[in-house]
Amino acid sequence: MVSCNGNKSAKIEDFSQSLYTPEYASGFDIKGADGHKSSLITVSNPWQGADSITTQLFIARDGETAPEGFTGQVLQGDADHIVAMSSTHIAMLDAVDAADCVVGVSGIDYISNPDIQARRDSVGDVGYEGNINYELLLSLDPDIVLLYGVNGASAMEGKLTELGIPYMYVGDYLEESPLGKAEWLVALSEIIGKREAGEKVFADIPVRYNALKQKVADAVLDAPSVMLNTPYGDSWFMPSTESYVARLVTDAGGNYIYQKNTGNASAPIDLEEAYMLTSQADMWLNVGMANSLDDLKASCPKFTDTRCFRNGYIYNNNLRTNAAGGNDYYESAVVNPDILLRDLVKIFHPELVEEDFVYYKQLK
């Protein structure tokens, strides 16, 4: 009878049945095993520079146990108490009406999500990596902590292991495809036992995105040249032509002006080259913290005689910024690439879009 019990642990190799294979994202997949309710989420290369690194989360359901010898993280049942170390994790959960699962965050003042702000007295702010309040984190009794790595593994790994709290890396920020970033919401939906709902939510996003992209392509319009960003110290970082933001610009009918960088990371250029590019550009986007042309003049005084500045064709992605400076572009826009695309189409080809801006604004 024991051998026929459905709660019997499977072998890890049994978890080879695809439950969800992403179409756009490259950093995760979800597998199951015949006759088992449990699932296995595999995350690949979850930080910059990672090479052939995989991390795994086994979600043990229906009384099942993790396979013998499994060395990854184990979540007992669906998570309903989650500590999210990035605001994008909150946006993904909110997309499937599960923001109420979030019991802890990092930097609550900078989070835009209205549910979190409405519950801020009961949502714990555990601090930032390198200065985590583990006593508070433990008191929140989380089922799982959602991490991200920058240039290596999170410094939280060791302490979470010591405390017996499972974790999973979420690598949405590494995806270059706008749709790939959004697709991570399916992985988070699996954690809370709502994968089918997550799949349904996500399935509509590429439909809307690609329909607008095709509308722009069919219009055969002139593509304005687009400059991006502002200086950081003595350098000006220019995204790759394959990057998230460059792909959005292209799909919206713009022409990203810096075509030299075809790598997989932003490349620094000197201010002289940046000035030359800005002088040639029709439009200038993503200009740091600037809320007005005067703000931009103060941070880039030498750039006020460029054509795009004189013509006022400068747009920033900070329309939805809260009192503390938290920018919803870096939060909910991740799961709304179709709306982000629409904003850019409105900038480049306003005749094609009637809706108001959501994330962008023209500086005055």
Image (cartoon, rainbow, N blue to C red):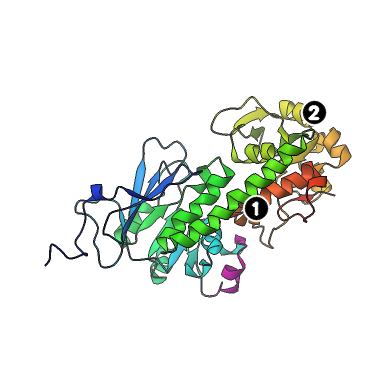
Note whether residue 299 is visible: yes
Q: Nearer the viewer, residue 115 or 267?
A: 115
Note whether residue 253 is visible: no
Q: Nearer the viewer, residue 288 or 184?
A: 184
**Residue at x 34% of width, y 59% of height:** 166
Residue type beneath disc 1? Tyr
Quarter holding the N terminus is bottom left
Residue 140 location, x and y as percent? 42, 70
Q: Which residue is mark 2?
A: 280
**Residue at x 42% of width, y 59% of height:** 190
Location of residue 113 by image quarter: bottom right
Task: Please provide the residue range marked out in magenta.
Answer: 110-121
Q: Quick check: 54 above or below 117? A: above
Q: Earlier in the sequence, mark 1 or mark 2?
A: 2
Secondary-structure class at tag 2: helix
Residue 240 location, x and y as percent? 60, 32
Residue found at the far front of this picture: 218
Residue found at the far right of this picture: 310
236 left or right, relative to 361: left
Residue 225 location, x and y as percent? 76, 32
Location of residue 74 by image quarter: bottom left
Q: Which residue is mark 1?
A: 329
**Residue at x 39% of width, y 35% of height:** 51
